[in-house]
Image: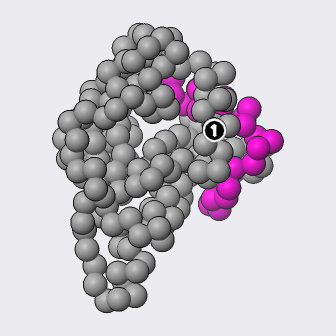
Amino acid sequence: MQVRAAAASEIDALAKLWYDAWQDAHARIVPEKLTRARTLEGFRERLAAMLADTRVAGPVGAPLGFCILRAHELYQLFVAAAARGAGIARALIGDAEDRLAARGVETTWLTCAIGNDRAARFYEKHGWHRTGTVVDRLETSLGIIPLEVWRYEKALRVLANIVAGREGAARDGDGMAREHGPRRDRF
């Protein structure tokens, strides 16, 4: 499955994919207030702001999945329900890890809603390790919503280290923070 840059013309399709997949994965396991705050329009706005960091699997205008990177973090990863099991998530996570390694990131991280067992199994199957829980303070249109989440990390084979003949797994600098600052665009 080829992974490509997102096109501005597909923001609506990506927002619908994100909204539907988010509702499927999170609506039953996160506070009702957060579910109310996660609207289709909100996902459109977030995608527009992060389009340059968004990669997509599937034809232009008909995306099957997408991922977003932010600094050292695999920030978002969603696949349409109809496309699950077709290798889309595997292609997206592989692309994300390659891009992070090319940037020199030695240890990447992500968060996963507690109770999102399908996603947790996927991450663990692909070499990610749960390091504990953290509290994300999610900035939403309804105010700050704290959400305890699982934190996962993965040591990457950094291209510069491979060329130099050494591999490392240094922390990404933010360590295992117990509380993240306000985040408008997580979950």
Circle 1 is placed at which residue position?
49
- Provide residue 4's location: percent of width, then percent of height: 67, 58
Amino acid type of the residue tagged 1 in the rendering: Ala
Tell whether 168 sits left or right of 140.
Answer: left
Span shown in magenta: 1-27
Q: Secondary structure at mark 1?
A: helix
How many marks are shown on the rendered structure? 1
Quarter of the rendering containing residue 137: top left
Q: Is residue 5 above or below residue 28?
A: below
Q: Residue at coordinates 45% horizontally, 63% vertically from top-left? A: 100
Q: Relative to 171, is 163 on the left or the right?
A: right
For the residue pair 67 and 59, the one nearer the viewer reads as: 67
Quarter of the image for residue 81 reads top right
Q: Position of residue 59 (x, y in %)?
A: 75, 51
Q: Quadrant of the C terminus?
A: top left
Q: Position of residue 135 (x, y in %)?
A: 27, 29
Is residue 163 depicted above or below 150 in this figure? below
Q: Residue at x 35, y 40 (%)?
A: 111
Q: Let me know if residue 20 is in the magenta part.
A: yes
Taking 104 as reference, is 95 above or below it?
Answer: above
Q: Main secondary structure of the magenta part?
A: helix
Q: Position of residue 2 (x, y in %)?
A: 65, 62
In the visual, does 48 lie left or right of 101?
A: right
Vertical relation: 135 (above or below) 69 = above
Q: Residues within 10 Å of mark 1 (few under 14, many from 20)?
A: few
**Can residue 62 be seen by looking at this rendering?**
yes
- Residue at image point 47% right, 67% down: 103
Q: Is residue 117 visible?
A: no
**Residue lying at 61% horizontally and 28% vertically, measured from the top left:** 43
